[in-house]
Image: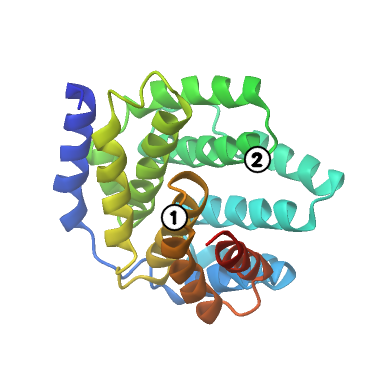
Amino acid sequence: MSVKRYLFLMLWLVAGPAFSDTALEDPAVVTVFSYIYNQQFDKADSALNAHKAEISDFFETFLAIDLHYWKCTTLNTKDEYKSFEELLRTSLPENTDSELNILKSMVVYIYSLRYYYKKINLVRFNITLMKMKLLEKEIHLETLAFVENGAEIMKIYHSIYTYFVDKLNPFLQVVHKNTHSADLALLEEKCHDDGLIISTLAHYFVGKIYLQFEKKPEQAESHFEILIRRFPGNIKFRELARECRQSS
């Protein structure tokens, strides 16, 4: 493990215990999130607008981008993809001179990577990846403390980021082989988190990792089954569980 990655991991471990679950269980945030993951996009959009005054800037950015990412990948139309690209553009702060702007930028880059990977746009994927690596240097303890429980979301996405970057770069797979296990272990731990948002994101990404990268569909299926029970309106979770059974 590189010195830089070791220091960043230690930062996460030190920062983690400082945050409680109260913000993640905020009724307004949970309501919007639940609508998104039940694929009730109109209700999610209405709830997000209705509760703007109650939701922090960080969570408003996270929920808005997450909502439109799910919407465009579910509806799969040119207009929705175009709308999502415009949202990414307008959601990116002009500078990173504040803790909030640093983390909002990171959220935009994370969803940009997911989007460009899905669209197989390698040029934009790699450009975004370089920007993200530079921004990562600006994340420190005070930055994470600024968003309180938002740090737990960033912790999950950082594990996803390091896992996929190493997996997608064949030159790093041997060097960073042990970090794959560490990132996956952290995500599996978060599956047992008391917060709805954290545990949901963890179950989803662990399931996807086992299905698509680790090639262990039998281990992936249980995560999607949990998500199906939690969000019965989500068609994607059912499709992923079915894919697991067909691949076993």
Residue displayed at 68% across by 65% down = 45
* Residue 187 placement: quadrant: bottom left
Q: Position of residue 148 (x, y in %)?
A: 30, 55
Residue displayed at 16% across by 57% down = 17
Q: Position of residue 151 (x, y in %)?
A: 32, 50
Q: Is residue 194 above or below residue 185?
A: below
Q: Earlier in the sequence, mark 1 or mark 2?
A: 2
Are the residues flagged by discs 1 and 2 in contact, CB closer than 8 Å?
Answer: no
User: Across the whole image, how many numbered discs are drawn on residues?
Assistant: 2
Q: Is residue 217 above or below residue 164?
A: below
Mark 1 Cα shell of 10 Å, populated few (<14), some (14-19), many (≥20): some
Residue displayed at 57% across by 41% down = 114
Q: Amino acid at mark 1?
A: Lys
Q: Position of residue 5 (x, y in %)?
A: 23, 29
Label disc, if present, on residue 175 of the rendered structure: none
- At mark 2, the secondary structure is helix
Q: Is residue 7 left or right of residue 202?
A: left
Residue displayed at 38% across by 33% down = 98
**The one of 158 and 236 positioned closer to us in this rendering:** 236
Q: Position of residue 145 (x, y in %)?
A: 26, 47
Mark 2 Cα shell of 10 Å, populated few (<14), some (14-19), many (≥20): few
Q: Amino acid at mark 2?
A: Lys
Q: Which mark is nearer the camera, 1 or 2?
A: 1
Label 1 and label 2: CA atoms lie apart by 21 Å
* Residue 177 placement: quadrant: top left
The quadrant in which the N terminus is found is: top left
Q: Which residue is mark 2?
A: 118
Q: Is residue 132 left or right of residue 42?
A: left
Q: Which residue is mark 1?
A: 216
